Image: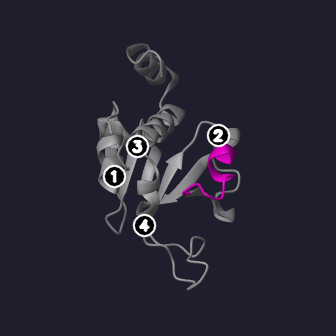
Amino acid sequence: MQADDRPARDEDVHELAQGMPHVTVEYGKSGNAVYQVGGKSFVFFRTPRPDAVDPVTGERHPDVIVFWVPSESDKKALVQDEASPFFTTPHFDGHRSVLVRASRLGELTLRELTEVVQDAWLSQASRRRADAWLRDHPGL
């Protein structure tokens, strides 16, 4: 197995997001990390909310991560497969983002997670920054 084919972990989210250019990290009231580019969030660790709950127990999920996506069609592609770890809630209707529980990140490979984080950054970066990054990373 190649390194990027291993299961993804929540610490990978932090490393990948911080590894993108021009990134700042803000912290919410609960200490949750919010990764931004140009003042716009592209990945953030969400605090437990009433719209993301365990269907059996009704308890709020404590480990939800939000990733911005380039378009509504990208969002649909990620959440339509019931086997996918990605999901959304009515709270995020009309919002270009998907959710995933950190406890399910291992269902993704590091390579897949890398693509999700890069796409999130590209969807929020300025056109100039996105174009420069894409020029430096041909074939992506």
Task: Kindly report which numbered mark, 2 or 3, lies closer to the viewer in this rendering.
Answer: 2
**In the displayed structure image, the side of residue 119 where residue 89 appears, left or right:** right
Report the residue marked by disc 2. 74
Which structural element holds mark 4? loop
Which structural element holds mark 2? helix
Inspect the image, locate mark 4, and give the three-letter code of the amino acid beneath it: Asp
What residue is drawn where x is 60% and y is 71%? 51
What residue is drawn where x is 64% and y is 50%? 95
Task: Kindly report which numbered mark, 4 or 1, lies closer to the viewer in this rendering.
Answer: 4
Mark 4 Cα shell of 10 Å, populated few (<14), some (14-19), many (≥20): some
The answer, for residue 64, to whether it is visible in the render is: no
Check contact, mark 2 vs mark 3: CB within 8 A: no
Along the line of sight, which residue is nearer the eye, 102 or 89?
Answer: 102
Q: Quote the CA–CA distance across marks 3 and 1.
A: 8 Å
- First-in-chain label (4 vs 1): 1
Question: Where is residue 91, by image quadrant?
Answer: bottom right
Along the line of sight, which residue is nearer the eye, 58 or 22?
Answer: 58
Residue 65 colored in magenta in the image: no
- First-in-chain label (3 vs 1): 1
The residues colored magenta run 75-85
Mark 3 Cα shell of 10 Å, populated few (<14), some (14-19), many (≥20): many
In the image, residue 82 lies at what x, y percent?
Answer: 65, 59
What residue is drawn where x is 31% and y is 64%? 31
Which structural element holds mark 3? strand
Question: Where is residue 105, by image quadrant?
Answer: bottom left
Check contact, mark 1 vs mark 2: CB within 8 A: no
Specify the label residue 121 is tagged with.
none
